Image (cartoon, rainbow, N blue to C red):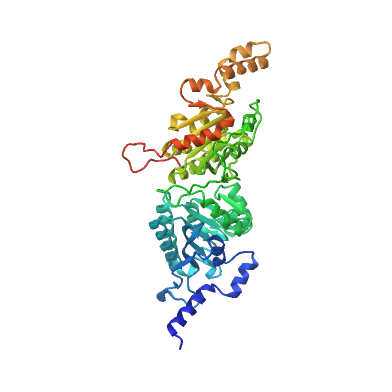
Amino acid sequence: MSDPRLEELVRLRQRALEGGGAERIARQHAKGKLTARERLNVLLDQGSFNELEPFVTLRDREFDPSIERIPGDGVITGYGRIDGRTVYVYAQDFTVHGGTLAEMHAQKICRVMDLALRNGNPIIGLLDSGGARIQEGVRALHGYGEVFRRNAIASGVIPQISLMLGPCAGGAAYSPAMTDFIIMVENTSFMFLTGPQVIQAVTGEQVDVESLGGASVHSSTSGVAHFAAPSEQNALSLCAHLLSYLPSNNVENAPVVDVGDDPRRTDLELNHVVPFDDSTPYDMREIIDRVVDGETFLEVQAGWAQNALVGFARLGGQSVGLVAQQPMVMAGVMDINSSDKICRFVRFCDAFNLPIITFVDSPGFLPGIAQEHGGVIRHGAKALFAYIEATVPKISVITRKAYGGAYVVMSSKGLGTDINYAWPSAEIAVVGPSGAANILFRNEISESEDPEATQAQLAADYRARFANPYRAAEAGYIDDIIEPSQTRPKLISALSALREQFRPTPPKKHGNMPV
């Protein structure tokens, strides 16, 4: 005789596994989307998922006969492993109440976030939701507040990654915005605070959801998203790859991965990357790819503020954060968006014990009324503040231009950088040679018979006398001028000699960072 208690357990567990039922699952698949459980199977190591609170549903006192009671209440929570490392996860199930957030739905998310924080493991959210469940009113709104509070508490303690696999509208968008990384799926996921209908009613503007808050918009225009993937499977694989560079929490180090690249390897091609003509652009990614281990450079926010490059890589197997200018875009000039991009990335690396390597080639900050009125001073100060606060090992390499404020901001020795290198092609000065000649020799140029030729000669003289790395090295602001081909072994050697540093500051709750 079978045990009715076991039969009831099997029945309820099967009901939880069915989600919103075959018809709703079919509609999900028809949109080219996986179900929540299918997503977890792709993300996590096979057989490693352990579900928590699968039987949670609406409270009896809140039961509305018009709302179907389905175990799980629209979100699957639990823990599993990625590449053998424990992670906590929650996956909103769009087949159940449209993945809408209600009191018990939020309670499940909060519970798994609390466990992740308590045990020092990353938390990954798979978001696919219609927003707040209207029938629950303020209880749903309170649930969002509880989730947001945990996002803030966990920030800088455990990595938080949001995978946008469907809609995320209204206040719900604030939770992923507070996490460390957002991965969106092209033509499938979207985020916005107010939808197209509301915008049209209020402002008269007409826009569709993709143009308003799709992956292409947030990865290239707004900077909200850090990665855009062509499919859900790509997004889930990218999440696992990203985690491989990160520690599980802020008191551990990232995994060391030996990819078989000799740490003493040199690259003579690096000696020829920077053109003799300082107005000729080159691709900073080529330098990064030639210096780091194998093909390990993972660029973050590649489509936004492209005059700056940030991302993760490995040097001698060690995970590091890389910051650089991109001379191919706007000559690598600093501006509002690139300052914000650099600031947040530097702060993340510092929070999670990742050394910061900075490659410098910038003619300064972008001039213009729009930049000044947009607060470029305030935004540039964010990058300064981030570098100064960072206590992880910091190394900089000046490859070409380091002028004015850009020299100072980009991990200069004055900000507390541990080791500063320069290539022989480096140009370090308050302003560029042409600008300096125009300021210092204005009268001589204007009174000469050939002002253009005179200006060019004076600029060349200034470059030879002042805008070179040897003047900075003589004053102790550069630790060494290195042959470009030696950059990789120099960086790896420096990393092995540097450790996280304690830098005493006056007693305070926290600094008031410019935002």
Q: Pinpoint residue 128: horizontal percent, then vertical percent.
A: 55, 62
Q: Is residue 278 left or right of residue 472?
A: right
**What residue is at 45 percent from the left and 52 percent from the top?**
248
- One can see residue 508 in this view: yes
Task: Please identify the residue farthest to the left as the structure is shown.
Answer: 507
The answer to whether residue 67 is seen in the rendering is: no
Q: How many tags in the picture?
A: 0
**Residue at image coords 46%, 21%:** 475
Image-based side of 505 in relation to 24, left or right = left
Quarter of the image where one finds residue 271: top right
Q: Residue at x 60, y 44 (%)?
A: 295
The image quadrant that residue 485 belongs to is: top right
Location of residue 376 with respect to 173 vertically, above or below: above
Q: Nearer the viewer, residue 498 or 340?
A: 498
Q: Quadrant of the N terminus?
A: bottom left
In the figure, 57 relative to 383: above or below?
below
Residue 284: x and y, percent?
A: 61, 36
Q: Nearer the viewer, residue 267 or 3?
A: 267
**Is residue 353 depicted above or below 84 in this figure?**
above
x, y percent for residue 102: 46, 67
The answer to which of 18 and 258 lies nearer the viewer is: 258
Residue 466 coordinates in the image, percent (x, y): 54, 19
Pick the front one: 68 or 4: 4
